[in-house]
Structure formats: structure tokens, C-alpha cells
Amino acid sequence: MGLDIRTVSKAGQTIGVLIAALLIVFMPAMVELFDLMQYTIFVVMGVLALSLGFIWGFGGILSFGQTAFFGLGAYTFAVTAINTDGGWAAVGLAVLVPAIFAAVLGYFMFYGRISDVYLGVITLTVTLILFNVVNSTAGDAYTIGNAALGGFNGIPAVPGLSMPGDPDFFFGPEENWYLSAGCLLLVYLALKGLLRTHFGRVVVAVRENETRAALLGYDPRIYKLMVFVVGGAVAGLAGGLFTNWGAFVSPTVFSLSTAAQIIIWVTIGGLGTLVGPVLGCFIMQYLVMQIGTQQTFNADLVMGAILLGFVMAIPMGLVPLMRLGLVGLVMRLLPGKARASDATVTETTAVEGAK
């Protein structure tokens, strides 16, 4: 009995999820407290990378402004946490507010039939507007409830989340790790499950050929809008987790440098995958952290060089490249008849990896 590529792929994904779950459980016992805090911000940014990886890789929507939703989530969490003293409503609103903002913005973009190029320009412009607006909120007049926005100084001393049922016990580094890493795994599984539904298949069909999908009776605008809203909600969740981790938020969450980094993470990890953006995010954050310990090289220069190298040498990204290598290995292990019958699967994998 020969191996089946689909079976191997599903088994590999299941094993990967189990390994990730074990790492989440045992990581606090394996590393020092400082390293655990660093890894926590890694997984928080992994959630942010997933938001762009989903809307760009599967919805075909290149957003240069994911930091707009990330920043809205971060500020919403801070304002709500200050007014509720660390209540869990901060997490819900950090997801809801960016989702509503994405719905309003996306409605005008998609139903206005804005072209893909202008979508990127509009999302970038919105991010710049939010950055300048929040940066200009210094002074006592700019407060929401008990929360002073603080302008370019940001909002310090944001209360962290408290343990459900015990409002006097606030989350420490270990609890924040479990929360953030757990959210990353749950968001990954939720997006993967969503893509396996009828909705997910239509979304991919719209990405592949919008005109053909419309001729089949589907309205590409509503599907793009829904993908955009989901991406905004996920980015908002990342923003809330970021503020909870650092107990501080400033207008830098809307910065163009962060927006550019997200695109680099997705490009390096690979489009059309959910693991790729997270892997690219982890690799680049680790490299930046290591580069920050010396003064010889500039981190932004190194990131730019890595991006150029990947675009020129491995345009498909790391994960699709590894998938092609795995498919090639499995095909060599398959008997002759099974190899011939699975040729179509190999070709499809190669095409998807190249996108």
C-alpha cells in the first residue's frame, strides 16, 4: 500500500498543531522569564502576520495598512482596560472596533470597485491619517472616560487582564504567554477551518478569477468585504494582546515601519499559506532581536536585503518551497501507479506554492 500525498499532508498538519500545543504548555518551564516575554511578543506579532496572510494570500487583497486595525485594537484595549480596570471587555472591543472600521472602509473600497493598486494606496493613507490624528491628542482635552490619549507620549500604565473569577489576580508573564500563544493557535485553527467551508472555497475562487466567480452567481464584493473584516478583527486582537503584554501603547503602533514588516513576514513565509506568515514573522523577529545586540549592522538594512534576496531567489516563500520538497520526497516513495495518479496533486501544489 503506497503513501498518499493528501494523507501525509493532513498527518503533518496534525502533528504540527500537537507540537505547537505542547510548546505552549511547556515553554514557561523551558526558558528564562526574559526569553518568555520575548517569545510572547513573537506570537502576538504572529497573530498580526496571520491577519495579512489571510486577506492577501487567500482573499487576494494586498493591504498596506494592517497597522491601522492593529493600532485601533491596541488603543481600544488600553482605553477600555483603564475604564474597566482590566476587564475582559477590553479584548472583545479590541476585536469589535477594528472589525467595524474594516467593514466601513471595505464597503466603500469594494463596492466602489476600487482597483487593487488603489486599495493599497487607500489603506496606507488611512494608516497615515490615524497615526497623525492619534499623535495630535496631547493635552487634557483628549480623554475617553478616565483614559488620556497622551498624544505622542502614548498611554502608559495600562492595566493588564485579570483572572476570570478573581479580579485581584492580574496576569503575569506566564499567563500572558498562555493567552497570546493560545490565541495564535486558535486563530490559526479558526482561519483554517473557515477556508475549508463553502465560504472559504468561494473566497479562493474569487482570488483566482473574480469574473468567473461572478458569472457563477457569487458577488465578489461581499466575499472580499467579509475577508477584509475578518483580517481587521484578527489584527485588532493582535493589537489588544500587544497592549496587554507591554502595558503601554503609543502612536508607533500605526507606523509605516511596522506595516512594511508585516508585508516582509508574509512574503518570506509564503503567500497562500497560514503557517508561512507566522514562520516568516518568527524568523525575522528573531533576526532583528539578534541584530539589536550589536552595532555593526542596521536592522532595517538587513531586513531590506533579506526581502530582496527572497523576492529574487525564492519568490514563492519558505513554506511553499518546503511543501514542494516534501511532495517530491513522497512521490519518490510512491509506487509507480500511485505516482502517476497523484501527478495532478503535485502539479497543483507547485502552482499554489508559486502564487
Image (cartoon, rainbow, N blue to C red):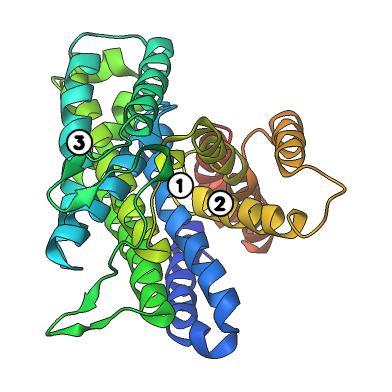
Q: Which numbered dot is residue 9? A: none
Front residue of 200/310: it is 310
Q: Which numbered dot is residue 281? A: 2
Q: Which residue is denoted by mark 3 in the rendering?
A: 141
The reply, left or right, for residue 166 in relation to residue 11 is left
Tell us which disc is closer to us: 1 or 3: 3
First of labels 2, 3 by sequence position: 3
Tell us which disc is closer to us: 2 or 3: 3
Characterize the local packing of mark 2: few (<14), some (14-19) or many (20 or more) Cα atoms within 10 angstroms: many
Q: Amino acid at mark 1?
A: Ala
Q: Quadrant of residue 184?
A: bottom left
Q: Which residue is denoted by mark 1 in the rendering?
A: 49
First of labels 1, 2 by sequence position: 1
* Residue positioned 27% across, 54% down in the render: 78
Front residue of 40/309: it is 40
Front residue of 95/5: it is 95
